[in-house]
Image (cartoon, rainbow, N blue to C red):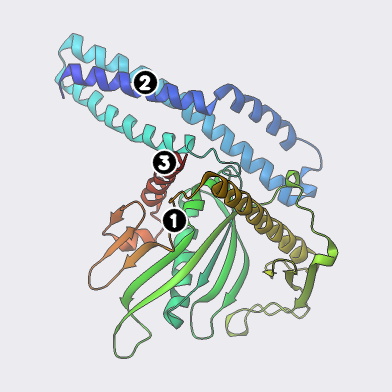
């Protein structure tokens, strides 16, 4: 890379960072940190563990966000100084070091830019994810369990707290469905692009003839409800059933009716919770997820009205959004963004950032085209 090209790209990266900093608003982040620090230091915070977890998680995220901005600003300043020193001294080794740092800064800025695209109404919320097995019998149930592990490993890579809220095991293997919460700021905005139908193609380990099997699983992502959302549900609209929690092979079976199944009668939405030890805790968790789903339903109805007023805008996600092919070749491909990788093991081990980032950018392009 010629020195003129290096200088031009450095200026471009500095402009990109300025745009990111403007959107991220460091002064607002500092104010948020101060407010959350006061809340975290308040006596009795941990009397409500869920509230305490939200406060500490948001505080940690805000501190990390500010640190990233300050670190990037310093790296860009240092890179400019390093480049000037290399040119003045005609030092090829230092210039090569500057070029390597330039490439690293470029990649880091691309990651930071993704965060600026998460500006939807609920993007900063925690996420509630539900995976359901679809067509494909026992292979689909096994695929649902593979997806659960994939998302848990992704969350682990990012140090996100995950809490499994409800699990329904299939008879032979795998899962009928599972619901879990990802307790991290912007978890909903990040994971919302994972919602849709996922397809797996492989030689079935459950087929004694070794035939290829195609199976499906559905992923639903909704934002976690907050007290400020004011989703009021009359008691008369809810039917509550209690039953005993159960696990595979008779494990983790409670001796009391602590599990809760909550049905919203006007919409038919059903939520089950059995993770907590008491019926009261499961009822509270079920109500929170039910409120979250009603919030999403309300938002979808409002969006439908806007589309009706705006006319026919063809910007649909479609049913099948990603294919995982293990036979006759190895590939995972997102059908919306065309992003694909050949290392399927890495993807199932939680290496999803490339797919998520591409989908977030794709979604923004679709929103701009629709507007």
- Residue 271 visible? The answer is no
Q: CA distance from mark 3 to mark 1?
A: 14 Å
Say above or below: 132 vs 243: above
Q: CA distance from mark 3 to mark 2?
A: 28 Å
Q: Mark 3 vs mark 1: which is more N-terminal?
A: 1
Give the residue displayed 65% in from the left and 52% down from the top: 224
Give the residue displayed 73% in from the left and 70% down from the top: 263
Q: Label for residue 14?
A: 2
**Where does the image place residue 231, in percent across and percent down from the top left?**
75, 52
Give the residue displayed 45% in from the left and 82% down from the top: 138
Q: Mark 2 vs mark 1: which is more N-terminal?
A: 2
Q: Nearer the viewer, mark 2 or mark 1?
A: 1
Query: The N terminus appears in which quarter of the rendering?
Result: top left
Say few, some or many: other residues with alpha carbon within 10 Å of mark 2 (under 14 / 14 to 19 / 20 or more): some
Give the residue displayed 79% in from the left and 71% down from the top: 239
Say above or below: 342 vs 217: above
**Where does the image place residue 85, in percent across and percent down from the top left?**
24, 12
Q: Which residue is mark 3?
A: 369
Specify the quadrant of the image occupied by residue 124.
top right
Q: For mark 3, give the secondary structure.
A: helix
Discs 2, 1 touching: Cβ within 8 Å: no
Q: Which residue is mark 1?
A: 317
Discs 3, 1 touching: Cβ within 8 Å: no
Say few, some or many: other residues with alpha carbon within 10 Å of mark 3 (under 14 / 14 to 19 / 20 or more): few
Q: Nearer the viewer, mark 3 or mark 1?
A: 3
């Amino acid at each position: 890379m010629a020195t003129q090209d290096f200088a031009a790209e450095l200026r471009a990266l500095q402009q990109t960072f300025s745009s990111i900093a403007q959107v991220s608003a460091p002064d607002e982040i500092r104010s948020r940190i101060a407010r959350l620090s006061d809340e975290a230091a308040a006596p009795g915070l941990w009397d409500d563990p869920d509230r305490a977890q939200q406060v500490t998680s948001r505080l940690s995220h805000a501190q990390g966000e500010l640190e990233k901005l300050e670190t990037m600003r310093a790296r860009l300043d240092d890179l400019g100084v390093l480049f000037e020193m290399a040119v003045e001294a005609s030092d090829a080794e230092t210039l090569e070091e500057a070029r390597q740092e330039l490439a690293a800064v470029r990649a880091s800025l691309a990651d930071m830019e993704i965060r600026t695209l998460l500006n939807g109404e609920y993007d900063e919320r925690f996420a509630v994810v539900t995976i359901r097995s679809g067509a494909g019998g026992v292979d689909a149930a096994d695929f649902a369990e593979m997806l659960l592990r994939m998302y848990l490993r992704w969350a682990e890579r990012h140090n996100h707290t995950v809490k499994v809220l409800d699990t329904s095991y299939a008879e032979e293997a795998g899962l009928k469905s599972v619901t879990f919460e990802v307790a991290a700021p912007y978890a909903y905005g990040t994971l919302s692009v994972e919602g849709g139908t996922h397809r797996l193609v492989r030689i079935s380990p459950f087929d004694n003839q070794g035939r290829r099997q195609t199976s499906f699983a559905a992923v639903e992502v909704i934002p976690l409800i907050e007290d400020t959302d004011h989703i009021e549900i009359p008691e008369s609209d809810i039917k509550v059933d209690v039953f005993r929690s159960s696990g595979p092979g008779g494990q983790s079976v409670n001796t009391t009716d602590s599990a809760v199944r909550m049905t919203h009668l006007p919409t038919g939405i059903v939520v089950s919770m059995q993770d907590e030890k008491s019926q009261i805790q499961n009822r509270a968790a079920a109500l929170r997820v039910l409120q979250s789903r009603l919030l999403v339903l309300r938002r979808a109805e409002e969006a439908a009205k806007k589309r009706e007023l705006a006319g026919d805008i063809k910007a649909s996600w479609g049913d099948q959004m990603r294919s995982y092919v293990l036979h006759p070749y190895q590939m995972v491909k997102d059908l919306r963004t065309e992003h694909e990788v050949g290392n399927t093991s890495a993807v199932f081990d939680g290496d999803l950032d490339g797919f998520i980032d591409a989908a977030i950018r794709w979604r923004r392009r679709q929103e701009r085209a629709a507007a």
